[in-house]
Amino acid sequence: MTILELNNITKTFGGIRAVDSITIGFKKSKITGLIGPNGAGKTTLFNLINGFFKPDFGIIRYKNIRIDSKPPWKIAKLGIGRLFQDVRVFGKLTVLENVLLANINEMGESPFTLLLNLKEVKRQEKENIEKAKHWINFVGLSNKENSPAESLSFGQQKLLAIARLLAGNYEVLLLDEPTAGVNPALIKSILKIFLKMIEYGKTIIFIEHNMNVILEIADWVYFLDEGKVTAFGSPSDVLENPEVRKTYLGL
Amino acid sequence: MEYIVHILIMICIYGILALSLNLLVGYSGLLSLSHAAFYAIGAYTTTLFMMNAEFNFFTALIYGIIVTAISAIFIAYPSLRLKGDYFILTSLGFQLIIFNILYNWVGLTKGPYGIPGIPKPRLFGIEFYSNYLYLLLSIFFFSMVFIFLRLLYNSPFGRALKALREDEIAAGALGKEVPKLKIWAFIIASAIAAIAGALYASYITYIDPTSFTLDESIFIVSILLIGGSGNIKGPLVGTVFMIILPELLRFIGLPNTIAPNVRQMIYGLLLIILMRYRPQGLAGEYRFE
Amino acid sequence: MILQLLINGLVSGALYSVMALGFALIYNTTKIFHIAHGAVYAVSSYAFFASLRLLGLPLALSLILGLLSGTLLGIIIEILVYRPLYQKKASSGVILVSSIGIYIFIINLIALIFGNEIKILAPGIQKTYKYGSIILTQIQIIEIIVFIAVLAIFIFMIRATKFGKLIRALSNNPTLLSTLGIEVLKLRIGIFALGSLLAGITSCLSSWDIGMDPYVGMPMLLLSAVAMIAGGIGIFEAPVLGAFLITITQSVAIWKISSKWQDTITFAILIIFLLVRPQGILGKRKRIEEL
C-alpha cells in the first residue's frame, strides 16, 4: 500500500529546477533508496516532504492527507520523522534531553495544560525518561546519557539522532545519508536497527551514496539526476542500468 | 538598615524582570529589547486601575498582567517572521513606540508629568506602608515568580524552548510547534514583567516614562548578558551584581555626579569583555554563539 | 506652511542620508549592525566642539579634527573589537551586544568629560535666505550642497573605482574574496573609515545647526538603520531613499498630527517594511530558502 505519494512535484530555486515533475509512490513497510549525483534534488525532495519548502507545483499526500502546505511541525506530528545529513542534534543539551525532545508531549509543552495537570505531566515525564533511557541503551550510548550532545563524536551523534527517531514513534522515516561518516562496524548495527524498524511496521526512505548499503537493505530504488527520476526498480536492476552506470558510477 | 531594605526590594523587582526575560533570551534565544515596555505597561495599567477605578492593588495587578500579556502579542507575531538582527531591531522599535505613547498620550498617562500619589497595597486591613512590610510583599512575589518559572524552565515546555533556541529547524522536524512556543514565551515573560511594574509603582508611589526607557531595556538585558541566562543561576547572579555594583561605587566614595556615568562605563566594558571571552556570562548556561 | 515643512523634511532627509549611507556601507559589507556608529557620531561632534570652543582653534581646523576623530574611532573599534570577533567567527548576536557595550562605554565617557547638557556650537542666530514663501537657513543650504557633493562622490566611488569594486564584491560574496587572497582585513578598515567619516559629516553639520548632547547618536543611528532597511539592504545608495521617505513622512505628520510622534513614525515605517516588503524599496525579492 502506498503510504506517501508525491504527485508531479516541482521546485525551482532562482531559475534552476531542483526537483522537476517528480511522481513517486512510497510503499508502506518497505525500504526505498534514493540515489544519484550531488545536486540531483534528493535532499530537496526530503525538505519538500518535511514541509521546509513548499512545492511550486504538485501535491504530496501522506496516508491520503495533503501535506504539501503544512508546516514542518505538523508533518512531524502526523508521523514523518527526519534524519538530517548534518545530523542536527541539540549540541548544548544532554543526550537524554535530546531524546526526550522526540516525544510529542502535548500536555507538558503548553504552559496552560502544564499547570492544570502538574501531577500527570510529572508522571509522564518519569515514563518518558524511562523510554528515552531504553532507546539510548538500544543505540549503545548509555554511558553518555548526561553528556552534552556536542561532546559526542560524529558517529555517536548519528546514533543519538537515530535514537531520537526511534523514540519519536514515527511511521515514515526520511534518512539523509544515515551511514555517512560512520565506521563500518557501526554501519552494520545501524542497518540491523533499520531492519528491525521495518518489522515494527515502519516505512523507511533513505538517501545513500554507499551502494553496498543500498544492495543490502533497499527493497526499491529510485535514481535521480538533475531533478528527475531517470531510473527505478530493484537495487540490482537500477545498478545495472547503463545510464546509471555511466553518469553516476562512472563505469 | 532602611537602605539595605531598599536594595533588597530593588533586587526582588529586578530579579523578577530578569527571570522573566530569561524565558525569552536564555530559553528561546530571542534577544528582546522590549522588556522595559512590558515593565511600563504593567506599572501604568496597575496604577491607572488603582487610581482611576479605585481597585485595590491586587485586583489592579491582575488587570495589569492581562493588559501587558495582550500587548505582548504585538511583538510576538513579528518575532515569528523575523530573524536575528531584524527581530532585535523590531523589539527596539516596539520599546520606543510604547515609550512614545506613554510620553505623548498625556490624557491617559499624564505624559512627562508622571503619576504621583500611587497608593500602597492593602490586604485584610493592613496597608503595606512601611518598607519592611513592602520588602515582605516583594519577597512574596519574587518567590512565587521563582517557583513558577523554575517549574517552567524544567518542564517539557522549557526543554522545547531550549531546542528552539539551539536549532529551530531540527525542533520543527521533531514536531515542536515553533510559533505557539514563541508566543507563549512572550505572553508569560511580559505578564511577569507586569508584576515587577506594579511592585515598582506602589513602592516609589510615583511613575513617569523616564523609568521605562530604551536604556532600561538595555539594562535588563545586560543583567542577563553579564550574569548569564538559560538557567536559574545566571539571572539571579546578574541581578545581585548589577544592583550591588552602583552601591559599591558609592561606597568607595565616587561622587554622585559622575557615579551613574562610571557605572554605565563599567557595564559597557563588561559587555565587550564578556562577549569576547565568556559569552555565557558569569553564571549562565546559554552561550551567545 | 506645508511647503516649508516639506522643504525642511527634504533638507533633513539630505543630511541624515549621509549618515545612513555610512551605516549601510558597514552593514552591507561586514553584516555588522554597528550600534557603536552612534558613538562615532557623538565623538565627531564633541571633538569639533572641543577644538572650536575649548581649544579656540579656527573653524576649518576644528571641523577637520572633528571628522578625523570620528574616523579614527571607527577604525579603532574595528581593530580592537570587531576584528577579533570576526576571526573567532562569532555570531551576529555577540557582535551586536559588543557594539552596544562600546556605545554605552563611549557615550558615558563623553558625558563624564563634557557633562550631560546641550552644547551649542554656532554663535548667535543663523543667517536666513528667503525664496518666495520658503525660508532656508545658511546651514540648511550648506547641508544640501554637502549632501549633493557627498552623494556624487559616493556613487562614483562605489561604481567606478577599484575600492568600490572590492566593496561590492565583499558585499556579494565574502568567502570568495578571502580565498582570492584579497586583504579583507585592510578592506574592512577602509570601510569603517569611510562609514565613520560620513557619520562625522552629518554629525558636525547637525550639531552646528542645533547643538548636541552625549545622547544624540542613538536616534540618528536608529534612523539610519530604518533608512537602510526601507531603502533596501544590499544596495549601497538605497538608504538615501529610505531617509527621505522617513523625513518626508515625518513632515507630513507634523503638519497633520503633531511633532510628538516622530519616533513612532520611524518605527512604524520599519515594522511595515519588515513585515510587508523586507527587501525595501529598491531591493529584489530574495527567495533565501536556507536550511
Image (spheres, coloured by chain):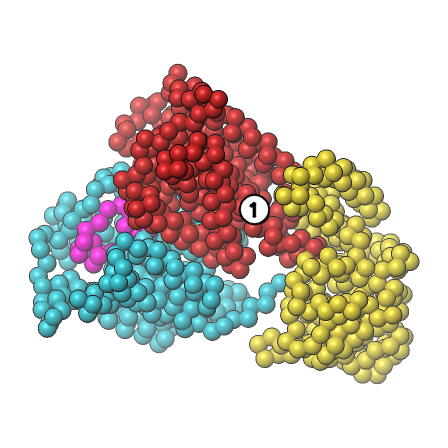
Q: Nearer the viewer, residue B256 or B127?
A: B127
| Callout 1 secondary element | helix
Residue at horizontal 38%, vertical 57%?
C267
- Residue that sits furthest to the front in the current view: B53
| B28 on left or right of A204 | left
> Color used for chain A?
yellow
Give the residue displayed 48% in from the left and 69% down from the top. C172
- The quarter of the rendered structure image containing the N terminus of chain A is bottom right
Reading the image, the residue beneath label 1 is B185
Is residue A90 a member of the stretch shown in magenta? no
Chain part drawn in magenta: C203-218
Q: Colour of chain C?
A: cyan
Instruction: Indicate whether residue C216 is drawn in magenta.
Output: yes
Q: Position of residue C137 (x, y in %)?
A: 13, 63
Which secondary structure is most common in the magenta stretch?
Answer: helix
**Residue B59 vs residue C60: left or right?**
right
Evaluate whether residue A84 shows in this view: no
User: From the viewer's perspective, is residue A224 above or below residue B256?
Assistant: below
Quadrant of the image occupied by residue C183: bottom left
Q: Look at the picture and state if B125 lies above or below B265.
A: above
Percent from the top left, x then y, of residue B211?
35, 38
Give coordinates of residue A121: x percent, y percent.
Answer: 72, 39
Please provide percent x and percent y for residue C72.
31, 53
Q: Quadrant of residue A122?
A: top right
Which residue is situated farthest in the top direction here?
A: B1
- Chain B shown in which color? red
What residue appears at the point 79 percent right and 61 percent down from the top-left corner? A173
- The answer to whether A118 is drawn above or below residue B29 in the figure is above
